[in-house]
Structure formats: structure tokens, C-alpha cells
Image (cartoon, rainbow, N blue to C red):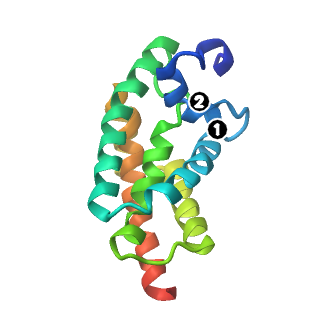
Amino acid sequence: MKSAKMLFNLKNPIHFMALGLGSGLCPKIPGTAGTLMAIPFFLLLAQLPFWAYTLVVILAFLLGIKICGIASKDAGVHDHGAIVWDEFVGYWVTMLPLVFYHLPITWQAILFGFLFFRVFDMLKPFPISYLDKNISGGLGIMIDDVAAAIAAMICLRGYLIMFV
């Protein structure tokens, strides 16, 4: 696979967003770097009321379909590893229970949300793998991460019930 630096232009705002503000250029584990970059934004978004948080996440998902599709097409590679906007949205979906239930945002909750999301995003158990392999374009890039996030969100909710 060609280097992300050869395929994408960070001066292009669509590429910049799709690459998670540049975090996707991390040479190793770009998805993990993208998820880490999503955390400070989550901390800001979590201050919003639940309805506004949800609206922002939905808009970020819809924007992601567009920008990830364009960046992927520009690079000529479907779901290039450097495209990590889907990780941003996936992490924000994972963290929905904290905002919904007005729970304290602790480092443990942030860590477990991160770990649950990364495990489901990397392992892609069914039906996540099905979505990853069978839906193309920007929607395909985004939807498997949202599915992974829903699974991670369920695990995070279980953690929160048991330990918070």
C-alpha cells in the first residue's frame, strides 16, 4: 500500500478531516491514533446536552460518509488505514451512555470506552465483518466502525453498571 503522505494532501480540508486532523498519518496503528485524537473532542462534546451531543454525532457520521468517500476515491484505495474519521465517530458513539446517563467522565470510563471500541474495530466479529466487506464507499468506511461502536457501547454500559 502506498504511503499515506503520497496519497493525501493535508492542505485539502476534506483529506485533513478524513485523516482525523492528521492523526491517521501515524505510521503504525493509525486507527488507534485516530481514536486517541477523538478523546479530547469527546471531552468537549460531553459538555453538551444529550440531544445536542447525539445531533453532533449524527452530523459527524453523515459528514464522514461524504469526506471518507471522497478521500478514499482521491487516494484510489478503499478505506485506506490513514482514513480515521470513522474512528472519531465510532469513539463518540461508544461514549454515548456517559452523556445519556449524566455519568462522571472518569479516566477509567475513557480508557474502557477506548479499549472496547478498539477491540471490536480491530477484530471485527460478525456482523461488523460483514458490513466491512459488503458495503462500499463512504458509507462502507463509516458503518463498520459504528457497528463496532454499538458493540463497544453495550460493553461499556455493562462496565458502568457493574463498577460505577
- Residue designated by label 1: 30
Q: Is residue 87 above or below residue 100?
A: above
Residue at horizontal 49%, vertical 86%? 164
- Residue designated by label 2: 82
The one nearer the camera, 5 or 55, is 55
- Describe the element under mark 2 as helix, strand or loop: loop
Residue 48 x %, y % = 38, 60
Q: Is residue 6 above or below residue 132?
A: above
The one nearer the camera, 116 or 105, is 105
Residue at horizontal 41%, vertical 65%? 153
Residue located farthest toward the right when viewing the structure as drawn: 27
Dot 2 amino acid type: Ala
Residue 36 x %, y % = 62, 50
Distance from Cα at disc 2 to Cα at disc 1: 6 Å
Q: Is residue 39 above or below residue 106?
A: above
The reply to whether discs 2 and 1 touch (Cβ–Cβ < 8 Å) is yes
Q: Is residue 145 above or below residue 153?
A: above
Residue 75 x %, y % = 52, 14
Q: Of callouts 2 and 1, which one flags the residue occurring earlier in the amino acid sequence?
A: 1
Residue at horizontal 72%, vertical 37%? 28
